[in-house]
Amino acid sequence: MFKLWPFKGGLRLPSHKQASSLAPLQTMPLPKQLIYPLIQRNGSISQSLVKAGERVLKGQVLNSTEEWSIPPIHAASSGRVVGIQSFPLIHPSGMDGPCNVIEVDGLDESVEFNGFADYRTVEPQVLLDMIHQAGIVGLGGAAFPTAIKLDPPKPHRIDTLVLNGAECEPYITCDDSLLRHFSEEVLSGANILMHILGVNDCLLAVEDEMQESIAALETAQSNGDFRRIKIVPVPTLYPTGGERQLIQLLTGREVPAGGIPAEIGVVCHNVATAVAVHQAITDGEPLLSRIVTVTGQGVRNSQNLLARIGTPIAELIEVCGGYTDSVQRLIMGGPMMGVALPSDAMPVTKATNCILVAGQDEVIVDKQAMPCIRCGDCASVCPVELLPQQLYWHVRAEQLERAMEYHLPDCIECGCCDVVCPSHIPLAQHFRSAKTKVTRKEQEKAKADHARLRYDARNTRKLNEQMEKAEATKRKRELLTKMAENHKSG
Amino acid sequence: MLAVLVLSVVFASFGLILGFASIRFKTDGDPLVDKIDALLPQIQCGQCQYPGCRPYALAIAKGEADIYQCPPGGDVCVKALADLLGLEAKALHSDLGQEPPKRVAVIDEEKCIGCTLCILACPVDAILGAPKFMHTVIASECTGCDLCLPPCPVDCISMEPVNETLAEGYWTEPAAGLH
C-alpha cells in the first residue's frame, strides 16, 4: 500500500458522477463553425495570422507568438475564415472579446503531421519546443502552458512527476473517461514527460472510486514498458484534485506559499495533458480536441464528448439531446469553482473540462447571508489551513494589508468554507474580490511609481537645461566683454 | 576636581559620538515628504493648486496644505493620508471637483499641426513629436492629467476612458445583501 499524507480539511461531497461516467464516450460530429478567442491567458490580445476569406486546413496555426507563455492555437478542421467577430468570453467578467471564426467545409483536410518514432533519441529541448508548437496547455482547467511547466528554473532539481487523474470536482468525469479510453496514451505520455524532465519516478493519482480507470491503467501497464509509473488510488475528497493538495497527499511535501511545485522537486500535470503530449511527440499532431463532460439535470443525456476545440457549446448540448425543462444555469467547470456562462454561443476552449447544465435542484440558490457567528467551521475544512472567518472580517472592513497578513493570496478559492458556512456567507467570492482589489492596488502603485520617475526625470532635465542656458549666456557675455576690451586696447 | 575631569571626558565623548552620527546617519530630504508622496497618485495634474504631487506633499508636510485636495486620489487617498498623519479623514474639497474616472489623452492625428505646446505641458513626457510633425500620446505613460488640453490651439486632444482589460482582475464583490 502506498503511503499517503492526507492534508487537513477538505470535504466529502456528493459526487453526481454516475450519470456521465456510465454513458459511453462519444466523438462529436464536425461542427458548422469553429470559434477561437484571440485573448490570451495574461489578458493580451494576440494577432491573428489568417485573413478573412482565407482557407485554413486542420492543424494550421491561427495565432501564435515566439513566447512560450502564449502557445499557438490551431484550426481543428478545414474551412474558410469568416473573420474576427466579437463573442462573449468564458470569463467571470462577462466581457466580450474578439474571436477568429471559421466556417467548416466538412472536408476535414489536414496539414501534414510529423512526429518522432522514438522520442528517446531526441533532445528534451527539441521536444519542449514541439510541445509549445503543438499549443499544449494544462488541460485540467487552468490552461497553463505545458512547455513552461516542463522547463523549471535551473536551481530546482526535479525528482518526481505527478500525473493528476483525481477529478477535481463533483459532476466532472472527463479525466475518468480519458483514463478508460486512452490509458495506453496516458502512460506513453508519462514516459515522454519523464524523459523531458529527466526523472525516474512518476506517480499517477486516480480517485479510488474510479475502479474501471484503475483496472484499464493496470491492463495497459502490464502490456508495455511502464514499470516506472506508479498508479496510486487516492481518496475521493474535495479538493484532492488541486495541484498543491495532490502533491502534499502523495509526497508529504508542501509547496511553499507563493512558490511553484518545482521548488520541492515535483512537476504536476493533468492526465489529459500527458495524452496531448503523446500525440504531439509521436504523431506530431497539435492539440485539436479534448474530452468535455456535459452533465446536470438541465441536459437530457449526460455524457462525455470528444469535442474539437472551438466547437460552440450549443452544438454539444444538441448532441446530448438538448435542454430539459428544469434548466436553470449554464456553468463551465464544476459546481464549486465553475464560472457561470451567459450563453451557449461560446466555444469549447482548451480549459473547458465540463459544461454543467444545472437544473432547479442543483443551482446553489443565492441564499440571504446572515452575520458570521464565529463557529469556526470554515477554518476546520480549509485545505490550506487559513482562517477564513478572520480573513472575512478584514476583507469586509477593507483592511487589505491585514488580510494579506492572514495569507489571503494562499486561498485556492475551493469554496469548502462556503459549503459549510451556516450563515451562507459567500466567503470564497469575498476572497476572490479582495484578491482582485489587491492586484489592482499593486498595479496602480506600479503605475504611480513609474509616473513619479518620469516626473522627476523631466524636472531634472528642465533644471539642467536652465543651468546650461544660464552658463551659455554667461560665457557669451564674458566673450563679448573680452572682445570689447581687445577692441579698445587694439 | 576628578569629578569635573571625568564628566568633561564623558561629555566630550558623547559630543563626538553625536557629531559623528549627525554626519554618518544624515538623512537627505524630509522622510515625511517621501511618505506622503508615496500615497499620492502621481497624476501630476495640479488640481491641488500645486505644480505636481511632490510639491503638494511638501506643502502638506509643512502644514500649508490640507489633505483633501487631491481629486484623482479620491477618498482612498484622503483616508491614507489621514492615517499617516494622525488626522481626521474628511470628504474631498468640494471646489476641486469629484474623483474623475481613469482616462488617457488621445491626439486626433488628422488635426494636429505639430506645434509642440502639448509636449511642453505634459508633466511626464508622455507625448512624442517634433515641431511641424504629427504628435502622438504614449498611452502607457499618460496619467490622464488633462494638462495638455488647454494649450492645444486646434483642440485636437480628447480624453478617453481607459478600457478595463481582462488582465486587471475581474471578480466583483458579492451582490448586496449577500454579505
Image (cartoon, rainbow, N blue to C red):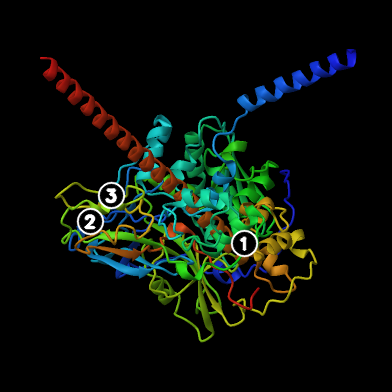
Vertical arrangement, residue B72 with respect to residue B175, above or below:
above
The quarter of the image holding the C terminus of chain B is: bottom right
Same chain letter for marks 2 and 3: no
- Residues A238 and A109: in front is A238
- What is the spatial separation of the Cα atoms under label 2 and label 3, in whole angstroms? 42 Å
Q: CA distance from mark 3 to mark 1?
A: 45 Å
Secondary structure beneath dot 3 equals helix
Residue A245 in view of the camera: yes
Hey, what amino acid is under mark 2?
Val
10 Å crowding of disc 2: few (<14), some (14-19), many (20+): some
Tell which tag, 2 or 3, sits nearer the viewer.
3
Q: Are marks 3 and 1 on the same chain?
A: no
Q: Is residue A110 above or below residue A364?
A: above
Q: Chain of mark 1?
A: A
Amino acid type at circle 3 is Leu
Of the two numbered discs 3 and 1 in the rendering, the one whose residue sits closer to the viewer: 3
**What is the secondary structure assignment of the residue under circle 2?**
loop
| Residue B120 circle label | 3
Image coordinates of residue A372 in percent, x first then y, are 75, 70
| Residue type (three-letter) at the residue carrying disc 1 | Phe
Query: Residues at badges 2 and 3 in contact (C-beta under 8 Å)?
Result: no
Q: Quadrant of residue B150?
A: bottom left
Spot the residue most to the right: B2
Q: Earlier in the sequence, mark 2 or mark 1?
A: 2
Q: In the rendered image, which quarter is residue A3 located in?
A: top right
Distance between mark 2 and mark 1 Cα atoms: 41 Å
